Amino acid sequence: HDKDPVIPPESTDVDDAPSVVSGNKQGSGGPYGQRGSQSVARNMGASAESESAVEAGLAWLAKVQCKDGHWTVNGREDGGERYGVGHTGLATLAFLGAGHTHKGKSKYRDNVKRALEWLIRKQGENPLGGACSRNFYEHGIAATALCEAYGMTKDRALKRPCIKAIDFIVNNMGGNGGFGYNGAGDDAHVTSFQVMAVKSAKLAGLDIRKGVFSKLKGYY
């Protein structure tokens, strides 16, 4: 029979164990309230043509999404899961950036829901507590997607996965504030994805341990 959903229809409160991040009650929406706003898009230079292109891209992503919720390297069901965490995180961010979440009446609601559930399952299966992937390049992308989804919806079922994902980043940060593919390191690209994830968590209303942002800023 089908697995129980990772994100239940009506999410309940989650345990807030001590962590480098902790819950901060912030009104729903907040800095995420303008995601998908047509007026904001126009002010940023969007046109009818560009918005049509975005919609076409989202429609294609929805079409090639695997049944279990992830995206493959070749856009086919039999494409395997190599780099699946990164691909799924990026695809999810595309939907979220256009204002589509797993809540509300979005026509892509199910696509986003299945993607988030798949990412959370990958996190749960990983022996490295909180990691969506051993590869920090992929983990940073996935953590950003989870935090963006939480920030946009305040779905309590996403809170604990977000906290765990950010914990994993902060606890593996190098002394120089940088990251590599396997943890502490000196790769600006990989580090940038961790910065995006931590910043998204902050915007979503999660408190980040004092000194983390200063250390990340120091890397650059």
Image (tube, rainbow, N blue to C red):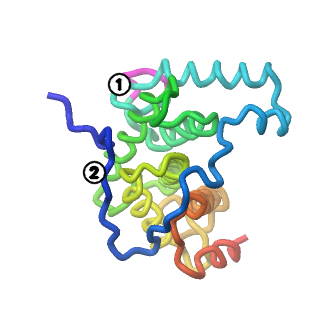
Marks 2 and 1, how far apart at CA? 19 Å
Specify few, some or many for label 2: CA neighbours under 10 Å numbering under 14, 14-19, or 20 or more. some
Whether 77 is among the magenta residues is yes
Going 50% across and 26% down the picture, which residue do you hit?
108
- Residue 126 x %, y %: 31, 54
**Is residue 64 rendered to the left or right of residue 195?**
left
Q: Amino acid at mark 1?
A: Lys
- Residue 143 x %, y %: 49, 53
**Is residue 189 rendered to the left or right of residue 197?**
right
Q: Which mark is residue 125?
A: 2
- Residue 139 x %, y %: 48, 53
Q: Earlier in the sequence, mark 2 or mark 1?
A: 1
The answer to whether 67 is drawn above or below residue 212 in the figure is: above
Secondary structure, mark 2, is helix
Q: Which image quarter holds the C terminus?
A: bottom right
Going 49% across and 28% down the picture, which residue do you hit?
105
Q: Which mark is residue 67?
A: 1
Q: Amino acid at mark 2?
A: Glu
Going 32% across and 43% down the picture, which residue do you hit?
10
Q: Magenta span: helix, strand or loop, mainly?
A: loop
Going 66% across and 35% down the picture, which residue do you hit?
36
Q: Quadrant of residue 216?
A: bottom right
**Nearer to the camera, 83 or 166:** 166
Q: Which residues are magenta?
A: 74-79
Q: Quadrant of residue 178?
A: bottom right
Considering every residue shown, the one lying at the far left of the view is 1
Whether 98 is among the magenta residues is no
Q: Which image quarter holds the N terminus?
A: top left
Secondary structure, mark 1, is loop
**Is residue 32 rendered to the left or right of residue 132?**
right
- Residue 150 x %, y %: 49, 51
The answer to whether 33 is drawn above or below residue 110 in the figure is: below
